Image (tube, helix red, strand yellow):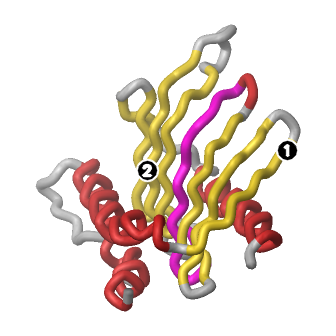
């Protein structure tokens, strides 16, 4: 367990490799995201052994069913199914260190802006520095790279706080 805590505590540093000026700009992001994935792999593997609290939230047309995972009384991960009504749906994972999101991933579909009924397949992977800043991020729309929204980090951390509050109200 100590090694996992250390890996998560050092996630921000691990997600910031030295820049190789001969490498393409996307190489840093890919390396950072790979480091983040490696850092949370142990946590993901242990979810089944952690204390699990199932909860849900509803806000307008959006509904969320999620599981919060605690280890040693501390929130370590949240796995969520998010339904945004006509806007789309996704499966999301939040990994936390010291109560802060350090890695978030989501896969789902979103309504295509300006079209009636058309959707896009979307995948996000975002490594955060523990204080809400993006270390590296990736957004794929229908398998093609797309710009990560400037508000994504605030959305991730804000929603994680809402989910954590809901889970804490039910935690033993």
Inspect the magenta stretch and tell me whether residue 127 lies in it: no
The span from disc 2 to disc 1 (Cα, nearest Å) is 24 Å
Q: Which residues are magenta?
A: 87-101
Image quadrant in which you'd find residue 73: bottom right
Which residue corresponds to the image point at 36% horizontal and 28% vertical from the top-left? Answer: 143
**Relative to residue 64, is residue 42 drawn left or right?**
left
Image quadrant in which you'd find residue 99: bottom right
Residue lying at the far left of the rendered structure: 22
Residue 162 image point, x, y percent? 76, 62
Residue 81 image point, x, y percent? 62, 44
Residue 106, placed above or below residue 161 = above
**Mark carried by residue 59:** 1
**Mark carried by residue 125:** 2
Q: In the rendered image, is residue 15 in sight?
A: no
**Mark carried by residue 85:** none
The quadrant the N terminus occupies is: bottom left
Image quadrant in which you'd find residue 8: bottom left
Which residue corresponds to the image point at 66% horizontal and 42% vertical from the top-left? Answer: 82
């Amino acid at each position: 367990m100590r090694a996992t805590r250390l890996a998560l505590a050092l996630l921000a540093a691990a997600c910031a490799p030295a820049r190789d000026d001969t490498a393409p700009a996307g190489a840093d992001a890919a390396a950072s995201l790979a480091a983040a994935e490696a850092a949370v792999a142990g946590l993901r593997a242990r979810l089944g052994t952690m204390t699990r609290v199932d909860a849900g939230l509803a806000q307008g047309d959006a509904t969320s069913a999620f599981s919060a995972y605690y280890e040693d009384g501390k929130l370590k991960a949240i796995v969520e199914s998010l339904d945004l009504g006509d806007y789309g749906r996704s499966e999301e994972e939040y990994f936390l260190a010291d109560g802060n999101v350090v890695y978030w991933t989501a896969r789902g579909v979103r309504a295509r802006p300006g079209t009636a009924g058309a959707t896009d397949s979307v995948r996000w992977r975002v490594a955060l520095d523990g204080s809400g800043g993006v270390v590296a991020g990736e957004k794929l729309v229908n398998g093609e790279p797309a710009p990560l929204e400037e508000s994504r980090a605030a959305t991730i951390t804000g929603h994680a706080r809402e989910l954590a509050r809901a889970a804490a109200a039910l935690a033993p």
